[in-house]
Amino acid sequence: MKRFLSVLIIIFIVGSNITVYADENNSNDINEEVVEFNLQDYYKYNDSKLGIETYSLQKSEIKESIYDGLVNLKTKINITSYISDVNNDNESINEILSLYFDVLNEHPEIFYSKNFTRVGYSYNPSTNKITYIEFLVDYLYDEDTINSMKSKLNEKINYIQTNYLDGVTDKFQQEYIIHDYIVNNTTYDYENYKNNTIPQESYTVYGALVNGVAVCEGYSKAALLLFNKVGIEAGIVTSSSMNHAWNYVNIDNKYYHVDLTWDDPVPESNRIRYNYFNLTNTEMLRDHYGWNSAIYPSFSDISLSALRELVFNQGSNIARVDNRLYYIDGQILYSTDLYGRYKKIEASVGYGYMPIAYKNSIIFVDKLNLNDIVKKYDLSSKSISTLYEANGTVYGIYTKEDILYIDTEEGLKDIKLSIYGDLNNDGIIDINDIALIATKYNLTSTSSDWNKAYDLNNDNIIDIFDLVILSKKLS
């Protein structure tokens, strides 16, 4: 068909750039358009969305087609067969474009496409109906790089599953574990944020879990991916006015807001907070705003009021070990369940401050004397031991892997915490540790449930040589 390009008209849809090539001389001709839609456009669209359905769109089929195209790295995804009687208007086009970002939010494992999309489409000006439409997709990397990055992400997910989530069936405890892992192992990309140079990876699950650096979208996508893995219903809440994203979760058939980004202090302190962990709408509205409540579940349940009161009173001085929360108040170490209930006295610990969890113990700073002392309370043996005596003040403590870092007047100190070969972290090396190695026997570093701690001779395989090393250390 002959196409005339006699007139070039430029139109701006709200939040979208659209170039229209229109034929003013032949009203029966087919006009072609390309529309671009980016992440901020998606936020704005969600904020203004009224929940009105365009029933001539087969949304689930379109999203399935987009997902299939992105998984298979297609650069053009044709969805013409899933539209019928759709007008060429802003509302319909923006609704179609938003489905692309819906797919990215529902499948955060697709981290390798750019943070914008385009649709190329044709319409008949005499009827104003769309006759052909396809997504035009740009990827961040080549196919080999994407496959390599996928492998690294899957390795990290398997590591988290094996070392933190295996054997845990309670959904609330699973949520705590995922929240704590991301907060403790991801740093907000603040320098790039300040300089307006945020790399694309910081918006993704890959940035959060593999690189350990992300902004809010990366935090929320990482959480969503791990929530999905353990069967926790969850989603992502967006606010264009805040330029921010966070999660919602369904725990015990009740919906809550959870903002991992705001629970991770800037500058990085490596301390876990629960200030934005499972809040109601009313609680979230104290400093969050701009989300469209019409498109999200109701966040009104107040059954976590005991937890909220505990967090309000203790701030960031709460540590979690398994299914208990611990805090120090008036020289006493207390614990509650994960809901902030059933308060229990654990031990007298002096003027304890800044408690953190490490395996089956609570590490804290004792400020009773002129010089601060870092101590450890073992929850199994009910005993207190001294880890470090400072020459002056201790400003903060945190752990990374098996290293305790102590911020002092004399600089940052580090102490190795784990006992080499103590695989079940009970403070001794015995037959139970031998049994654990047996469960991993013949695994290599490429295995999905690999755990480096079991490879005692660092040869990337768990075998008889590791058993010999461990047997020599038996208590």
Image: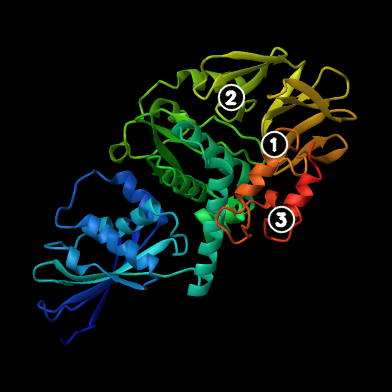
How far apart marks 1 and 2 lie (CA) works out to: 19 Å
On the question of residue 449 being in view, the answer is yes
| Residue pointed to by mark 3 | 464
Q: Residue at x 39, y 52 (%)?
A: 105
On the question of residue 17 being in view, the answer is no
Q: Residue at x 53, y 63 (%)?
A: 151
Q: Evaluate if marks 1 and 2 touch, with contact meaning CB atoms under 8 Å apart.
A: no
Q: Evaluate if marks 2 and 3 touch, with contact meaning CB atoms under 8 Å apart.
A: no
Name the mark nearer the viewer: 1 or 2: 1
| Residue pointed to by mark 1 | 425
Image quarter in which the N terminus is found: bottom left
Tell me if 242 is positioned left or right of 255 in this view.
Answer: right
Tell me if 199 is positioned left or right of 437 in this view.
Answer: left
Nearer to us in this view, 86 or 418: 418
Query: What amino acid is labelled 3 in the image?
Result: Ile
Q: Which mark is residue 325?
A: 2
Quick one: SS at disc 3?
helix
Rendering quarter of residue 35: bottom left
Quick one: SS at disc 2?
strand
Rendering quarter of residue 376: top right
Place of residue 30 in the rendered image (x, y in percent of width and height, measured from the top left): 16, 77
